Amino acid sequence: MKKIATMLCAMLLASSIALAAGPGPFYAKGDMYCAPGCWNADGGNLLSLAAGVWSGPVATDQGPGRHEFKIANLDWSENYFPWCNLWVHTSGPGDVVHFSLDTNVYGDGWLPNQDIVWSDHYAPPGTTFEVIGSAPETGGWAFGTPANLIGTVWTRVLTIATAGANEAKFRATGTWDVCNIGSEGAGAPCGANLAYTTVVDNTDVKFEFNSATGRARVTVLGPTPTLNTTWGKVKTLYR
């Protein structure tokens, strides 16, 4: 759910926080893969490195439902995220999940900027997403506003009536218990919110979440344009 302060999640397996991924190797460790023992590692959940991205398939050996995982090295001295486990949704034994840890630095406005953890089972098939946040237009954290899927990007443009600082997230429609996306991506239950500031009233703001990468961003577009017309034009419209 939304992050007001640092949150502690169940099963905090390590406490060191790395600023950038080290040499690895990295594994997708969790309770969806227990052949060597849940949260352990072997060749079945080992990720491969190419172009700065650790990635690979893991065949789950557990029942269907929501499971927890981290991307970590063998001794847990590096793990993402250190402060809570991430979520993955599987359909049952034999379901193949593709995990990734992208260590590249992007600086393109999408968040996270580096060390991006993601999986292609971030939510059950058919899940829809909404924007929820502190501004009244995003529900004041009480309810969400539906987003539209364009390609792989869930997006919504809203006019924020009152200037000021706000925060928001994407979440599965109507619930925090499936997947939510903030500035740390990954669908983590404890990830930070997306922060943005509008400086004038009635400003259009664009919210985006790319389901292919697990990254999100908020873009302040500017004041909503005012449509000017003349009485003659109005009479023409209703002639």
Image: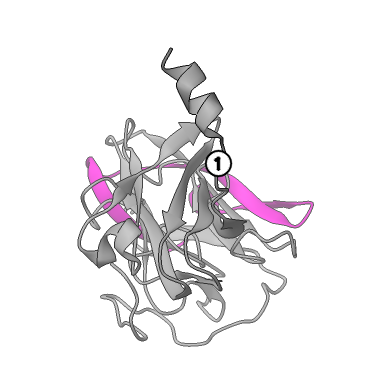
Q: Which residues are magenta?
A: 40-68
Tell me: residue 40, above or below residue 122. below
Of the 4 image quadrants, the one containing the N terminus is: bottom left
Left or right of 50: which side holds 25? left
Left or right of 26: which side holds 189? left
- Residue 91 x/y as whole percent: 28, 35
Residue occupying image coordinates x 40% and y 47%: 122
- Residue 224 x/y as whole percent: 54, 52
Residue occupying image coordinates x 32% and y 30%: 126
Tell me: residue 20, above or below residue 55. below
64 in the magenta segment: yes
- Residue 140 x/y as whole percent: 27, 66
Q: Amino acid at mark 1?
A: Leu
Residue occupying image coordinates x 39% and y 42%: 147
Tell me: residue 149, above or below residue 111. above
Q: Label 1 belongs to which residue?
A: 227
Q: Nearer the viewer, residue 73 or 166?
A: 166
